[in-house]
Image (cartoon, rainbow, N blue to C red):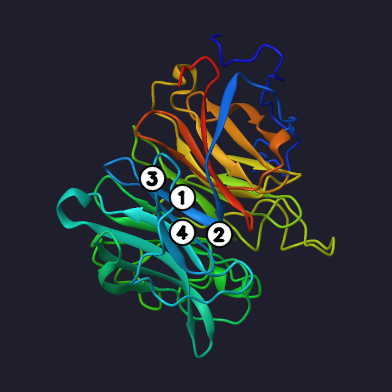
């Protein structure tokens, strides 16, 4: 099985569960394994970051890290943290809002473009937005906002905001339902609770599923999403995968496909925070089932498919950050379905906000706290 298939871990045999109806088999549910010990070395590279949210590696090994209050910093491998870069857009700092994800242009070596998602203030409240600017060491130059969620709304919850570039260079953006805008999630004239797909300059790809459809926003890729704060591109297929927050229960793993409806708030495996039922149940014609779901929740944030050499037994596995109860979640697949789940680092008690593979094959995490940390995860047998 290899060093990292801990023989003391609970193996998860995903079995068919009770059917909500004869026509709609229930999606596989996590059996909620406890966090286990694994032969890992955890190194704190930097600390003192204020609620860091997004992490991206520069080609030279330095890291760009966003702080939710509105700062973008560079962290060098030795752990030194730069002063905030200038040129970052003004952000709406309330609740979950602020400066959120960061991603480099696929052609960064030539265009030096950095993409930021953030909660943008406006007359009607705030909404998720995406800006880009040219990286110039101490600042972002020529910053322009290339996409805005509509409509804006009050409150500080559920901005989504993960940025993932497809293999064709298009940009996927996750958005949330803004907590109090549930009815708009099924409305194709808004970008509330959607996965968005745009070109790198903000224009609309010609093959988007709703382009040319009357009454629908042309940038929509898929809809029926509650609040996806984790997204990753499969390294082989190029398919987008997302992990989104449920309410009380019902966190979901999905692979959003063009034009499809993922059900929120009509169908869900969770209940409202009051304990009341949400929507019509867990299945309905025309609405997609999740690949996998959690109850109790893991509160997912940040995800990546592992492709490195430091953990050879984990190649192809999906890693997800857990804010609550706090862990690094690993999912193993076999021809599509999830067949195994393990959780690590629960003993640290950290809210893991983002998960990134470094150029050295180590796994890098940031923790969501007023004294947030940047951590490097390696095999325990690796020499420094």
Residue depicted at 83% across the width and 63% down the height: 276
Q: Where residue 338 sits: x, y (%)?
A: 57, 30
In front: label 4 or label 3: 3
Please, which residue is most extreme toward the top here? 1
Query: Which secondary structure, mark 1?
Result: loop
Q: Left or right: where does residue 383 sit relative to residue 7?
A: left
Q: Left or right: where does residue 354 sit relative to residue 328?
A: left
Label located before the other in sequence (1 or 2): 2
Label 1 sits on residue:
256
Q: State the separation of the CA atoms marked 1 and 2.
A: 10 Å
Label located before the other in sequence (4 or 1): 4
Label 3 sits on residue:
76
Q: How many marks?
A: 4
Residue closest to the eye, 251 or 78: 78
Mark 4, other Cα within 10 Å: few <14 / some 14–19 / many ≥20: many
Mark 1, other Cα within 10 Å: few <14 / some 14–19 / many ≥20: many
Residue 46 to residue 330: above or below = below
Residue 199 to residue 4: above or below = below
In front: label 2 or label 3: 3
């Amino acid at each position: 099985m290899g060093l990292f298939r801990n023989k003391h871990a609970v193996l998860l045999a995903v079995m068919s569960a009770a059917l909500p109806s004869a026509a709609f088999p229930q999606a596989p549910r996590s059996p909620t394994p406890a966090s286990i010990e694994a032969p890992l070395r955890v190194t704190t590279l930097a600390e003192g970051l204020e609620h860091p949210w997004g992490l991206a590696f520069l080609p030279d090994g330095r890291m760009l890290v966003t702080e939710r209050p509105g700062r973008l910093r560079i962290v060098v491998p030795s752990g030194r943290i730069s002063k905030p870069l200038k040129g970052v857009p003004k952000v709406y700092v309330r609740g979950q809002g602020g400066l959120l994800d960061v991603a480099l242009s696929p052609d960064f070596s030539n265009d030096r473009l950095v993409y930021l998602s953030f909660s943008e203030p406006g007359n009607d409240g705030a909404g998720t937005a995406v800006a880009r600017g040219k990286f110039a060491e101490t600042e972002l130059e020529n910053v322009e906002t290339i996409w805005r969620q509509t409509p804006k709304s009050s409150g500080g919850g559920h901005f989504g905001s993960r940025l993932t570039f497809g293999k064709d260079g298009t940009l996927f953006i996750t958005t949330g339902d803004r907590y109090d805008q549930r009815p708009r999630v099924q409305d194709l004239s808004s970008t509330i609770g959607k996965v968005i797909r745009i070109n790198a300059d903000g224009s609309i790809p010609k093959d988007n599923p709703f382009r040319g459809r009357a009454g629908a926003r042309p940038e929509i890729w898929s809809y029926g999403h509650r609040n996806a704060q984790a997204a990753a591109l499969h390294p082989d297929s190029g398919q987008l995968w997302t992990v989104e927050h449920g309410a009380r229960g019902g966190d979901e793993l999905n692979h959003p496909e063009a034009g499809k409806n993922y059900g929120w708030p009509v169908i869900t495996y969770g209940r409202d925070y009051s304990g009341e039922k949400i929507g019509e149940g867990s299945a309905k014609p025309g609405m997609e089932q999740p690949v996998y779901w959690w109850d109790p929740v893991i509160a997912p944030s940040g995800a990546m498919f592992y492709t490195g050499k430091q953990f050879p037994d984990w190649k192809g596995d999906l890693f997800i950050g857990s804010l609550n109860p706090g862990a690094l979640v690993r999912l193993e697949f076999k021809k599509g379905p999830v067949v195994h789940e393990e959780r690590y680092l629960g003993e640290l008690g950290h809210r893991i906000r983002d998960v990134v593979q470094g150029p050295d094959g180590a796994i890098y995490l940031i923790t969501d706290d007023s004294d947030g940390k940047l951590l490097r995860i390696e095999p325990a047998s690796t020499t420094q």
